[in-house]
Amino acid sequence: MNSKLVLESLDLKDLQDLANRLVQCLPSRLTIGLVGTLGAGKTTLVQAISSAMGVDRAEVTSPTFTLLQSHRGGGQTLHHLDAYRVADEDEFLELGVEELFDQEQAWTLIEWADRVEGVMPKNVLWLELRIDPQPDRRTVEITTADHVLSQVLETALREMISKG
């Protein structure tokens, strides 16, 4: 059973706050599936997470054409993938993502992850970004099947949840 947290009306500062809290509370090995329409803020959130890990956010760009970028910060590796141009789940697996999913001290963040949902790990953390009626605001829906991770997130994000 999946648990869901919803954070509403987040601006850029709030997205950085979310990223800071995620970096502080999430386990050292994790796959994060990022979902949202074009311009919803998937890459912006990855940049915020990388910045919270100590990586220069200017080094983090959308990997739409390169498919994979890896960065190191704070003793952690961040693999940033984009499944938008991947034809199907088989092509995605051919990129060697299963090795990334199993790598210790590594987060694998995948934009457009819903396109390859069938081959994502069981305990993926899903972050769906939606543009609010105010174009500079976002709603982030966080979903996971991992009960322990769900409780950790609920505690870490309590103030942000009640704000929404």
Image (cartoon, helix red, strand yellow):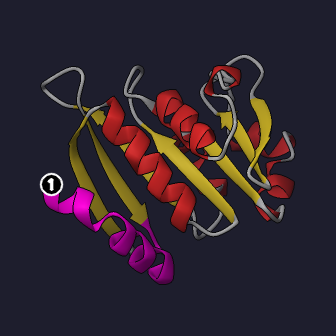
Q: Report whether 4 appears left or right of 116.
A: left
Residue at the image position 62 percent from the left and 39 percent from the top = 50
Whether residue 129 is visible, yes or no, is no
Residue 134 figure quarter: top left
Q: Position of residue 85 (x, y in %)?
A: 65, 23
| Amino acid tagged 1 | Lys
In which image quadrant can residue 73 be found?
top right
Depth order, front residue of 77/82? 77
Q: Residue furthest top?
A: 65
Residue at 56% x, 43% y is: 49
Q: Which segment did they paint magenta?
A: 144-164
Is 140 placed left or right of 53 in the picture? left
Q: What kind of secondary structure does the magenta stretch mostly adopt? A: helix
Residue occupied by mark 1: 163
Locate residue 76: give its quadrant: bottom right
Which residue shows up at 63% across the image and 69% down it? 27
Residue 46 painted magenta: no
Left or right: residue 68 versus residue 54 is right
